Amino acid sequence: MQGVSKRYGGVRALQDADLVIEAGRIHAVLGENGAGKSTLIKIMAGVVTPDQGRMLLDGKPVSFASPAGASAAGIACIFQELSLIPDLSVADNIAISNPPRHLGLIDRRAQRRMAEEALARAGADNIHPLALVKDLSLSRRQMVEIAKALARKPRILILDEATSALTAADVTKIYGVLKRLRAEGLALLYISHRMHEIAELADECTVFCNGRSVASFAAGTRTDNEIVELMIGREYNAVFPAHKQRAVSGAPPPLEVRHLGWSERLNDISLQVRAGEVIGLGGLDGQGQRELLLALFGVLQGTTGEILIDGRPVTIAGPNVAKRKRIGMALIPEDRKTEGLMLPMSVRDNLSFAALDRLSHWGVVDGAAEQHAVERIVRLLAIRTDGTAVPAGSLSGGNQQKLVIGKWLMMAPRILLLNDPTRGIDVGTKQEMYQLLRELAENGAAILFYSTDYDELIGCCDRVLVMYDGAIRRELIGPEITERALVSSALNIGTEARKAGAPQTAST
Amino acid sequence: MSGDWSFWLREHKGTLLAFAAFVVMFTIYAANHPAGLNANVATTAANKGVLLAIVAMAQTLVVLTSGIDLSVGMVMILANCLASSIVVGSTLTTTIGVVVVLLVGCLCGAINGLIVIFGRLQPIVTTIATGAVYYGAALALRPVPGGDVNTQLADALTGQLPGGVPESLALLLAVVAIVWVPFRRSAIGRAAYAVGSSEVAAYMSGVPVNRAKFVAYTLSGLLASMAGLFVTFITYTGEASAANGNTYTLYSIAAVVLGGVSLFGGSGSAIGAIFGALMFRTIGDLLFVFDVEPLWQPLFQGIVLSAAVCLGAVRLLRIRNRLDLYG
């Protein structure tokens, strides 16, 4: 790949990136959130087309209009989000892109053989080819995904965080499989945030930062700390309001969590958020931060552990319970278009949803009180809208996000959970949002703030809890919150670097 | 590998359940019929059942892609009106007439498909609109009931085979063999299932998403026109009846649900829908045999349908992330 660029709206996801992958090698790609890794592989897999630059395969320029095109060229990709079809059997899924045919009909016996062979190659021969994918566990599905990619007999195999859903036993098998594929002459592109996996497997590494490929080097020639150094170096473009120290009060914290767990995605999470504090949730995307917020908000079923509000244990059975006055919790969701707003409905309706019970008597909404409260919020947040009767969908992205926040401010929350609220909004609105968070905290709200943008965590938070694999691995307080500390703890270096040292020498 | 059959059972659970329920119901019906199960009783029951079964198959193809086709009944009516004008005369003209009717059915389905695929409209809205258009065309063809059909052909397909087996059942088998089996076993049929189960995953797997939808809608139109032909053979006339068209559309959806086809798409089979249709018909017949007032029939059919839908919702009890309920 040479000088590949891709822009999404005003955001430059990938800029002048270069990457060379050779047959018979495992090439690792590293980078923090939003560094351009995902965009890069989407281009290689034919999901998105680059704005600039070119891709060469065996020295010849290629471009793919669709995933099918990339597949035909011998590029197979195993995505983080699974690409399996739940209602079809394992064998059907493995053969989906090009089922073996006989007289125009699918030859089931040949397909069965093909599936068994592919499963065996992926080290998953204990999965029955006739089982329906929806009946399999996440880890097993991921193994099927790998088998499916192998069945296409690719020359280039891309694995995007392919091991993040696997159980330890399956991970070991995959290591063996990948090493065998390398020996067979495949080119493998391996994207992972697990440093010990990269140390174990990779021949070469390329580090991405801000959409650029900043360095390529042979594995084992740089220390973990040097790699972290390459990954950081974001440009600061935001100004954050000053923190004010608050006197620590003796009152129990508004939100406390003890030993919270949920399926395999959350493990033994304990945390406290005191009044007036902004606590950041850090770590790479998809380490359980979203699930933690959903669990607190009562969306997940079957959670274990305890949630305490003002020191008293409570059971939160759903968002309608979480928002009650006694708890006063609000969640600003990640996707404002689907989880935050009813886009075709008016600004006024959207703003008053969460507070309707407070604005109504005997089930009838008090129109005057509603209008008054809505106008107050619109003024407070400086939402740029042409009156309160226009549909929410007609506002700009930043103003829509303000609307989501405004909706919850209507009910004066004491505990505010935010799930990456500044994603895809302009710098000006971000500034206003940081200011607002501070003001809310100063007025005594307890804020838990998940962000994929490390600048925000550094600028806004009093403490940052870094998550990895569904657990909190590190707590950074005040001046400890630096980009270097965030990146290295997000990669879980420090605790694992020593462990990883041994296999690194063994494998070379 | 051992245990293949258990996976097979798991995959075809809906179809098998529908089959079993139909067998039970039909046995009760036959055992209690005042005249016993003679050839005439069977033929009448079969003709009614097969008609709905073919419409249900048409509905299944679209439902599998997680769409819905509210125009199947109207395509059937249009085919009926057309057939009552052109499926007449010599063997040659009759043959040409049948082919034209089937081609018109394909065209109707193809129009639905193209609008859904390229217009990016919801199938439900699209097919309500096109259904009205098809009905309008049927009315233009046959403002008042009437027309004729090649009686020899009609009798040959609605009577009895030697031994008293209803010929319509043989016809149904032929339709399954000609349309459904190749579809189910071809790559494009697989693609239609994939699209219905998860369109994103299908696209990411390089499945021809649009072609699969197009084929499903077109075949749906073809099957609906076959049903229209069959109506003509049973009644010897053409009638542009909006009530009939709507009834068959709604019953086809009921049959699909009873037959274990998921309305979310991606799972189920036309065989299940056939038994769903036969079951739905048998419910009505059962009430007749047990001398229940005909007025109660919709009520009981509704109860059976509700029960079937509830069974289908049992999986929701196991969901752990409540957001999945709305996904």
Image (cartoon, rainbow, N blue to C red):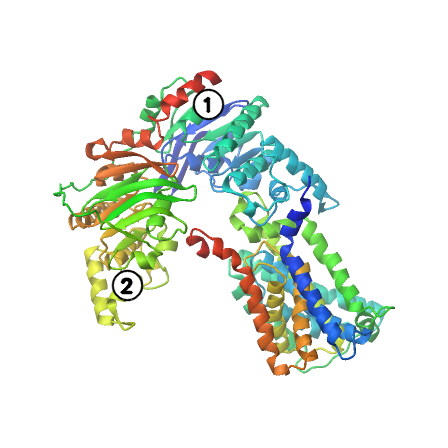
Query: Which residue is pictured at 41% across the width and 50% down the height?
Result: A302
Where B113 falls versus B302 (above or below)?
above
**What kind of residue is marked 1?**
Glu
**Residue receiving disc 1:** A200
Question: Looking at the rendering, which quadrant does residue B307 occupy?
Answer: bottom right
Marks 1 and 2 belong to one chain: yes
- Asked whether A239 or B276 is in front, the reply is B276
Callout 1 secondary element: helix
Where B66 falls versus B169 (above or below)?
above
Is residue B151 visible in the rendered image? The answer is yes
Mark 1 and mark 2: Cα distance apart in space: 54 Å
Callout 2 secondary element: helix
Q: What chain is tagged by disc 1? A: A
In the image, which disc is placed on residue A161? none
Where B91 falls versus B213 (above or below)?
below
* Image label count: 2
Query: Which residue is pictured at 63% across the width and 70% down the height?
Result: B73
Count neighbours of disc 1 (C-alpha within 10 A) and say few if under 14, some if 14 to 19, many if 20 or more.
Answer: many
Question: Looking at the rendering, which quadrant does residue A315 occupy?
Answer: bottom left
**What kind of residue is marked 2?**
Ser
Compared across the picture, whether A425 is left or right of A24 comes to left
Indicate the position of residue A228 as horizontal and vertical percent values: 33, 26
Where A504 falls versus A483 (above or below)?
above
Count neighbours of disc 2 (C-alpha within 10 A) and say few if under 14, some if 14 to 19, many if 20 or more.
Answer: many
Indicate the position of residue B29 as horizontal and vertical percent values: 72, 73
Q: What chain is tagged by disc 2? A: A
Indicate the position of residue A469 as horizontal and vertical percent values: 39, 36
Give the number of the mark in front: 1 or 2. Answer: 1
**Residue receiving disc 2:** A352
